[in-house]
Image (cartoon, helix red, strand yellow):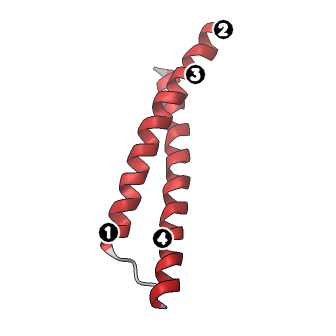
């Protein structure tokens, strides 16, 4: 169970950083186009979707890495 918790934590941090960067980039482009810092609801949903996709991929990857390190160590 411990490798799953470690993998979950690492995946969550990676996904959060990437999702925040993606939303920040979307807001920067929105500001460039419209000149206002409004946060449209679709941008928030896009950020959540980005977080979910990256979290799922990173969790699978980190879990595999943690298990292979545990088996070899």
| Residue contact at pointers 4 and 2, CB within 8 angstroms | no
Which badge, 1 or 4, comes first in the chain's sequence? 4
Please tell me which residue is depicted at 46% across the width and 44% down the height of the picture: 54
Q: Which residue is mark 1?
A: 42
| Residue contact at pointers 1 and 2, CB within 8 angstroms | no
Which badge, 1 or 3, comes first in the chain's sequence? 1
Q: Which residue is mark 3?
A: 66
| Residue nearest the viewer, comparing 50 with 29 | 29
Q: Which residue is mark 4?
A: 26
As drawn, the label of residue 72 is: 2
| Residue nearest the viewer, comparing 57 with 16 | 57
What is the distance, in whole Å, between disc 1 and disc 2 at their CAs?
45 Å
As drawn, the label of residue 9 is: none
What is the distance, in whole Å, between disc 4 and disc 2 at their CAs?
42 Å
Please tell me which residue is depicted at 49% across the width and 43% down the height of the picture: 12
Which residue is farthest bottom? Answer: 35
Please tell me which residue is depicted at 33% across the width and 62% down the height of the picture: 45
Residue 6 placed where, x, y %? 54, 30
SS of the residue at dot 2?
helix
Quarter of the image with the N terminus in it? top left
**Label 4 packing within 10 angstroms: few (<14), some (14-19), many (20+):** some
SS of the residue at dot 4?
helix
């Amino acid at each position: 169970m411990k490798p799953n918790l470690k993998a979950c934590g690492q995946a969550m941090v990676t996904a959060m950083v990437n999702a925040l960067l993606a939303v920040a980039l979307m807001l920067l482009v929105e500001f460039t186009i419209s000149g206002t810092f409004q946060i449209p609801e679709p941008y928030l949903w896009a950020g959540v979707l980005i977080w979910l996709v990256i979290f799922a991929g990173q969790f699978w990857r980190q879990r595999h890495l943690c298990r292979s390190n545990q088996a070899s160590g």
